[in-house]
Image (cartoon, rainbow, N blue to C red):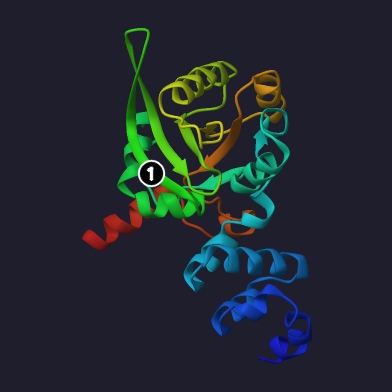
Amino acid sequence: MKSYIINYDLFVQHPAALLPWAHNMVLMDKLNHPEERLFYAQKSVENGWSRKVLVHQIENELFSNHGNITSNFNQTLPAPLSELARDTFKDTYFFDFIKIGEQSQEGDLEEALTNQITKFLLELGVGFAFIGRQYHLEVGNQDYYLDLLFYHTRLHCFIVVDLKIGDFKPEYAGKMNFYLSAVDEQLRQEKDQPSIGLILCKQANRIIAEYSIRDTQKPIGIAKYKLIKSIPVELRDYLPTKMELKKSIQEQDE
């Protein structure tokens, strides 16, 4: 309470003045820097976040991830749209709401995300409307299937998402370029903006990713995803090992 009162004069001309009391307490309790508070307050007002969603976005570090996606948006989209596209996508997405094994394939990841579509859409951000999984396209009398297809209500364009279970490879960009050409030809209407591709990989070397899309004419973003948030280094020594957990379970069974 004292902290809130001390900082109240900074909030009255601030988007936080438009937020409920509970939202403001989250901003004060969880954030130390004014620029971060301003960012999350603005996003809360713009997107109508609940308190729970606000906490989720802070914990998943939206401030540091937003706008940092590796992309060619500046070269492939007109100025106002390119800026909005950069603001829409993140460098890292957290899919800690799903569980898949180490030997899982891309189809398993795709199924897990669509089974948790509400949480998936929350992590993607406002404006994403889910159209379908394994969306069918026919090109040159051959069948092709998009992993995930969305329409973005603010960008006014289709979003093609290609999921990769491993690290980014340059050939993924060529495949996405092909998909976007097909979507623009077959699905895009006159009122729609150019379709955008999002390649989601476990890891992506930024230099390799930048080279892969530098001369591509279609707008493509390359981002990473994390299934489980990493445990802070200072806490790892205090956690039981796999063998210790197994031994503990056996002792309880005896």
Classify 132 as above or below 154.
Answer: above
Q: Amino acid at mark 1?
A: Phe
Question: From the image, which quarter does the C terminus lie in?
Answer: bottom left
The residue located at (71%, 92%) in the rendering is 2
Q: Residue furthest top?
A: 140
Expressed as whole percent of the image width and height from the top left, the position of residue 28 reads 67, 78
Q: Which of the 4 quarters of the picture holds residue 148?
A: top left
Q: Nearer the viewer, residue 158 or 10?
A: 158
Could you tell me which secondary element the residue under label 1 belongs to? strand
- Residue 64 as seen in the image, left or right of residue 172: right
The residue located at (69%, 86%) in the rendering is 4
Classify 163 as above or below 99.
Answer: above
Q: Is residue 100 visible?
A: no
The residue located at (73%, 39%) in the rendering is 79
The residue located at (43%, 51%) in the rendering is 121
Q: Is residue 113 visible?
A: yes
Expressed as whole percent of the image width and height from the top left, the position of residue 132 reads 33, 37
Q: Nearer the viewer, residue 124 or 218?
A: 218
Q: How many marks?
A: 1
Question: From the image, which quarter does the N terminus lie in?
Answer: bottom right
For disc 1, the marked residue is 130
Expressed as whole percent of the image width and height from the top left, the position of residue 49 reads 51, 67
Q: Which of the 4 quarters of the picture holds residue 27?
A: bottom right
- Residue 53 as seen in the image, left or right of residue 92: left
Q: Residue furthest left?
A: 254
Mark 1 surroundings: few (<14), some (14-19) or many (≥20) residues within 10 A? some
